[in-house]
Amino acid sequence: MPGKGGYNMSYSYDDSYMDDQYSYQETPDYDSHYDGYGGHQTLTSYLDNVDEDDDSDFDGMSESTASELGFEIEPPIVTKPKQPKKQSVAISQGSAVGETKTFTETLLAQMDSPKTHIITVKADEMPTPKPEPLPAFHSQSQPRTSMSTTPKNRSRDDLVAELNKVSVKSKPQAPRYNVLKESVTMAEAQWKAQPSATVLVVGHVDAGKSTVMGHVLHKLGAVDKKALRRLERDATVLGKESFKFAFVMDQDPAERARGVTIDAGSFTVDAPGGRRLHMVDCPGHRDFMPRLISRAVDPNHAVLIVDGSPGEFEAGWSNSGQTKENIQLMRAFGVSHLIVAVNKMDVVGWDKNRYNAIRAQTHSFLRTAGFVEGKNLYYVPVSGLKGDNLTAAPTEAVADWAKKSTIPLVQQIEALPLSTPDFASPLRMSIGDSTGESTAGLGVKVLSGVARVGDPLVLVPGGFPMTIRRIDVRGNAGIMASKEIAVAGDFAELSVLMKSAGDEANLLPGTVLAHPGHEPAATQQVRATIATFDLTAPIVNGSDVELFTHAVRVPACIVRLSATLAKGGVDKTVRPTALRANMQARVQLRFPKQVVMDAGRGALGRFVIRRAGKSIAVGVVSGVRE
């Protein structure tokens, strides 16, 4: 898609991915802002290392990640080994830690299977097994194991005798990520004093998203009367008098001239109930959907704005509109609760029948996406232009029904349940805004963990070391304030000191900052479970697509369709020839460059697949090849 500059990507694939023919070229005119890490290259023999038959170490996704997409995954059936009849030793095989086996079973397992663990020998004459390489793939559900081989040139009787002296132990687990207790205590106290939530505001083009958000910010005191008068003058000059509130969010001259949101704008405000809200106003036009996806990093909630005026809701709800796609994407982003704000109720005179008709028409589709009214779905009638039912109940007599049956939009947002962020997990900061030319003003979203001034960091991919010199965290009314720490959920700006001059060129959107020794994986190949949307053409082996994950946009190839899934997550069809609409499947994807992805870990484990300018599937990573 043409953008502000950069390059276009074109890549082709032969008739069969088995032939390992893949070419990748780049030509000027692509929007490099969403390219992840940038760079020009040419790849040939792209699929040379595809393992066609190795699917044993990817058994779908975990229950936690499945729930993020609304999938129902049954737990695997585990058969317990027989109890030992005589003398036995403790052994750990795969995930069954602490099980026991008889000497014969242990011996056969050692001789017939390479997947035994570290063996500690008490007898001096027992040879030390040589470790084999670790499996190429790793998934969240299958921990990495150490492997040993059977000693050679020894009889069965000798081995049985020596096994009497052998203690078989599982490999010690990697040391837990150690974060300073003081940092966690500070983060928890800060969050307890003022919880924060990231809220996406989405909807079809011209539904009034920017107007609603601009008016909310004005009513909450983030935009004073003087600033509003200036915006009103700007809108009048352009002949768009009613756009004064929209101009609060739409700052770009091109956005104001066209009257549509082009890039996602964000604003932070403290709500009356004490919760800090990071509001992200997302574009609704089809041409700018990639920018919505790239900016929607780890949100807590979402507000779907629909136009209640005659004919406009129907246009956005049709297959050519963006409303349904927005709903499907919300689940992929990890949104747990959704508010549907029926806007422009003043245009229809606060007609209750119109409001109820929209509720009835959207209810069924929302349920299929995992949003159920009364559980994690809420409806609120509003007027963005008039400001009714945004922060206070409407005063007009015709809106009495709304006053009695609903609560204002901001109160509804604050009433949504909010889980405590993951402060004690390894630090993950996704870079969203950076020019690659400076080490100051580095815009990040803290996904997990805690970062402090003076902490050493590593950039992934690349492994470039640096140190945090300054942290500025966005506060009320968007004001940046210097802080000692940045915690999970914060939008922050960093000033860092690179170890080597010139390394700042690698500080680009899509890269991730972490503490040394606890970096996420950077990979060119993943396995995942996906759910398809309405497809105009089936997905087959070798399909060329675009993948979006946190702030990364990268071309991808679906090199393998492993299996389609039935209800409950069990395999239905192994090695299907194609995927069609509304199917769940296990697949394997490859990329021409390294992408930071993490199996089952929040925003780094979720992604969106697009083709021909349309979202066709969402997925959760189940394993990565490092």
Image (cartoon, rainbow, N blue to C red):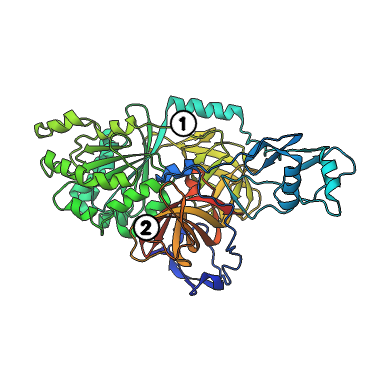
* Quadrant, the N terminus: bottom left
Q: Nearer the viewer, residue 573 or 478?
A: 573
Q: Which mark is residue 420?
A: 1
Q: Few, some or many C-alpha atoms within 10 Å of disc 2 (few <14, some 14-19, many ≥20)? A: many
Q: Tell me if residue 246 can be seen.
A: no
The residue lying at 29 percent from left, 30 percent from top is 411
Quadrant containing the C terminus in the rendered view = bottom right
Q: Which mark is residue 520?
A: none
Please give the name of the residue rendered at 42% of the width and 51% of the height, measured from the top-left corner: 566
Q: Identity of the amino acid at label 2?
A: Ser
* Residue, disc 2: 615
Instruction: Describe the element under mark 1 as helix, strand or loop.
Output: loop
Amino acid found under the numbered disc labelled 1: Thr
Q: Is residue 182 above or below residue 84?
A: above
Q: From the viewer's perspective, is 133 left or right of 46? A: right
Q: Is residue 34 above or below residue 601?
A: below
Q: Give the camera-side residue of 395 and 229.
A: 395
Say which of 100 and 457 sits in front.
Answer: 100
Residues at marks 2 and 1, CA–CA distance in whole angstroms: 31 Å
Q: Residue furthest front?
A: 85
What is the x, y in percent for residue 368?
A: 32, 47
Q: x, y percentage for residue 96?
A: 63, 39
Q: In this rendering, does residue 566 appear at all?
A: yes
| Mark 2 or mark 1: whose residue is earlier in sequence | 1
Side of 187 relative to 499 (left or right) = left
- Image height of 530 relative to 214, above or below: below
Q: How many marks?
A: 2
- Seen in the image, is 336 located left or right of residue 404? right
| Vertical order, 506 against 123 (above or below) | below
Question: Which SS class for mark 2?
Answer: strand
Quadrant of residue 152 within the rendered picture: bottom right
Where residue 120 appears, x then y in whole percent?
A: 80, 40
